[in-house]
Amino acid sequence: MENILLEIIDIDDNGRGVAKLDGMIYFVENAKYGETIEATIIKEKKSFIIAKKIKTVKKSPFLENTSITEKQLCGVYDLFDIEYSKQVELKKNNIINTINRIAGESLNDINFFEADNRYGYRNKIELKVSLDGKLSSFNRNSYDLVNIENCVMTTSEISDVIKKLQDLIFEYNLKGYDSSTGEGLIKNVIIRSTSFGETMVIFVLNKEYNLKNFYIALESSNILTSFYVSMNAQKNNYKIKDLVHVFGKKKIIEQLGEYKFNISPKAFFQVNKNMSYKIYLEAQEYIKSLKPKTIVDLYSGVSTTSIILSKNAEKIISVEINKDAVKDARENAKLNNIENIEWMDIPAEVAIDEIELDDEKTVALFDPPRKGLDKNIIKKIGESKINNLIYISCNPSTLARDIKLFKEYGFRLLEVTGIDQFVNTVEIEALILLARS
Ligand SMILES: C[S@@+](CC[C@H](N)C(=O)[O-])C[C@H]1O[C@@H](n2cnc3c(N)ncnc32)[C@H](O)[C@@H]1O
């Protein structure tokens, strides 16, 4: 089959280039936004074609002159070398087009919070270790490792920790895990930092191993506030299992506005502190105008939103499936002298059957994972007396699907705000307000 020329006009949620030719949509891995490429067809489906990039024929006019290398990205940042104004345009259009297409809206423009920092914003990173002991990151969609150096997207505290860890890993001759054989030692290195300069590291190990001298050296380097180890011997499973606290504090502390938050090793906390705080403040603006008696905060994590909104309602019901996060949330409320939050540490789709929903002065707030809301939640809220909903989403497609379903119960889309929380990546965060009159 002859090669074809494709102009990349968009980037999809998976970071693939999108092109249109003769009415067909093409998806191409490793294609840059704006470039023209020579490609070959790999797979033809009814409504789209998967193509493989052969070479760039014309460079993207949106490319920035940057000296940043793949090694310095320390992760997947598909848009890192695309002009920032174009990144914003792509993200705004993604939200607008997805909501219009799936939820039947006709948005022309939306509010958008641009990032305040393009680099140095990530307060959490997960790294791997190669078989020759080099800290590395995974390539997209594969177990291939890219050695890293001077990570530019992480906070300076995390960069400092990486340097020290790398020196010690070399010094103590520690090796990474081999995904093809299931052999090796270090599976995962999770590093977190807070704006107080506190740092936490978690090693996920493949087997029991005496690392006592390494731990002593790491502790005496004074670079870490907290260090944990977890054992997970399951093949190619890199997740934290049972945790052992090795040294330092058990939790690190972060602050958002007037509130402090203890963060334990497994708890979810947004990776871009400044931008996530902007989302919470925007949600608070909506809440202030609605003056609710009760806020039902579904998918509440460590209750960051519940705590920030605690003065804006008589009662907050905070629902989160992760029991560790709820434990942290209770402590966080105590730490901030907050007494009007009630917790349910069960799935939101189950909790919704137990929550009183027949008061018009209740506002529901959702912040689900990428898969969006469970159908039972939409049904129960739809059939309830609740008239105002705030929805924070990291996936425009499931957000748009859920807007469409809420519209069947008489809700209208009133506000949409996009937030560039995951700068230089294709990921987007959106906040919407739905109401029925
Ligand atoms: C995107 S996070 C939002 C957390 C929090 N609102 C914040 O801003 O930090 C989604 C949260 O939903 C929780 N979660 C996932 N599935 C759930 C379910 N079925 N019921 C309740 N919580 C769930 C996750 O543990 C995670 O804490």
Image (tube, rainbow, N blue to C red):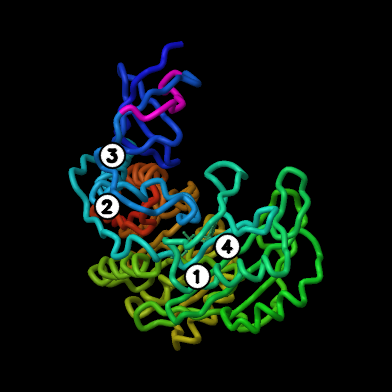
Between circles 3 and 4, the one closer to the viewer is 3
Q: CA distance from mark 4 to mark 1?
A: 29 Å
Between circles 2 and 3, the one closer to the viewer is 2
Q: Is mark 4 within 8 Å of ligand 1?
A: yes
Q: CA distance from mark 3 to mark 4?
A: 32 Å
Q: Is residue 387 magenta?
A: no
* Local SS, label 4: loop
Mark 4: few, some, or many residues within 10 Å (few <14, many ≥20)? Answer: some
Q: CA distance from mark 4 to mark 2?
A: 36 Å
> Mark number for residue 321?
4
The spot of residue 263 in percent (x, y) is 53, 75
Mark 3: few, some, or many residues within 10 Å (few <14, many ≥20)? Answer: many
Circles 2 and 1 in contact, beta carbons < 8 Å = no
**Residue labelled with disc 2:** 84
Relative to 345, does residue 349 appear above or below in the rendering?
above
Q: Is residue 54 magenta?
A: yes
**Residue labelled with disc 3:** 97
Q: Amino acid at mark 4?
A: Ile
Between circles 4 and 2, the one closer to the viewer is 2
Circles 2 and 3 in contact, beta carbons < 8 Å = no
**Residue labelled with disc 1:** 158
Q: In the image shown, does 211 or 203 lie closer to the viewer? A: 211
Q: Amino acid at mark 3?
A: Asn
* Local SS, label 1: helix
* Local SS, label 2: helix
Mark toward the start of the polypeptide (3 vs 4): 3
Mark 1: few, some, or many residues within 10 Å (few <14, many ≥20)? Answer: many
Q: CA distance from mark 2 to mark 1?
A: 24 Å
Mark toward the start of the polypeptide (4 vs 1): 1
- Quadrant showing the C terminus: bottom left
Mark toward the start of the polypeptide (2 vs 1): 2
